Amino acid sequence: MASAPGRTPRRLAIAALALVALAGCGDENAETPAACLAGSSAYLDALRVAPEPVLLEGSTPISDCVPADQDAAELGQAGEQMITTATQLNAEARRDPSGKATVQLGYLIGAVQQGAAEGGGIHADLLRRLDAAARFNQGGKQLPASFERALGRGYAAGQETG
């Protein structure tokens, strides 16, 4: 089908303007702090002080790792480190359900949820995956009440100071 004279250049101009507008939207993404993109060992090291306030690289609260307008790639990168951290802490927590690792795990979840509260739905999948990693138990068995209590202590601290 042939287009009317003069319409094709107009359509190209409109398409170009739309692309420029979309590219401009990408510039509005909040930058994820570099400390949040470090490996899971950085999270594990920082979480050692939980339930006291936890700072990545000595200055970045975990809640700052999930800004509202976060770039999806940076969310994926930071989220991967958080999930790895939660998985490692869960393995320790299953061995000692009322121990330090369970409190640290709760702190991580509380801090991420605190930071994600303003982000709307962009962080919903990360929160779901963190919770699944935290509550994993071989064979799907329920974790003991001591696990829930320690997780809750850490979670409350993460919500408050995370």
Image: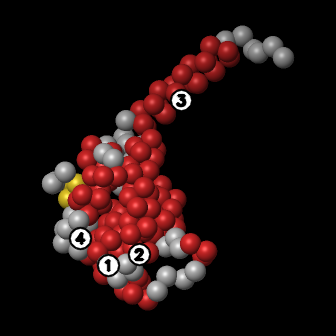
- Decide which of tag 2 and tag 3 comes sooner along the chain: 3
> Which residue type does callout 4 highlight?
Ala
Q: Which mark is residue 95?
A: 2
User: In the rendered image, which quarter contains the C terminus?
Assistant: bottom left
> Which residue type does callout 2 highlight?
Arg
Q: Which mark is residue 99?
A: 1
User: Residue under circle 4?
Assistant: 50
- Decide which of tag 4 and tag 2 comes sooner along the chain: 4
- Decide which of tag 4 and tag 3 comes sooner along the chain: 3
Residue at point 35%, 82% (across, down): 98
Residue density around tag 2, few if under 14, some if 14–19, many if 20 or more, within 10 Å: few
Callout 1 touching callout 2 (CB < 8 Å): yes
Q: Pinpoint residue 141: horizontal percent, then vertical percent.
A: 58, 80
Q: Which mark is residue 18?
A: 3
| Image height of 28 relative to 99, above or below | above
> Which residue type does callout 3 highlight?
Ala
Residue 159 seen in render:
no
Which one is nearer the viewer's eye here, 130 or 65?
A: 130
* Drawn side of residue 140 relative to residue 118, left or right: right
Q: Nearer the viewer, mark 4 or mark 1?
A: 1
Residue 107 occupies which quadrant of the picture? bottom left
Residue density around tag 4, few if under 14, some if 14–19, many if 20 or more, within 10 Å: many
Residue 116 occupies which quadrant of the picture? bottom left
Q: Nearer the viewer, mark 4 or mark 2?
A: 2
Estimate the spatial distance between the alpha carbons at disc 2 and disc 3, rounded to whole Å.
Answer: 55 Å
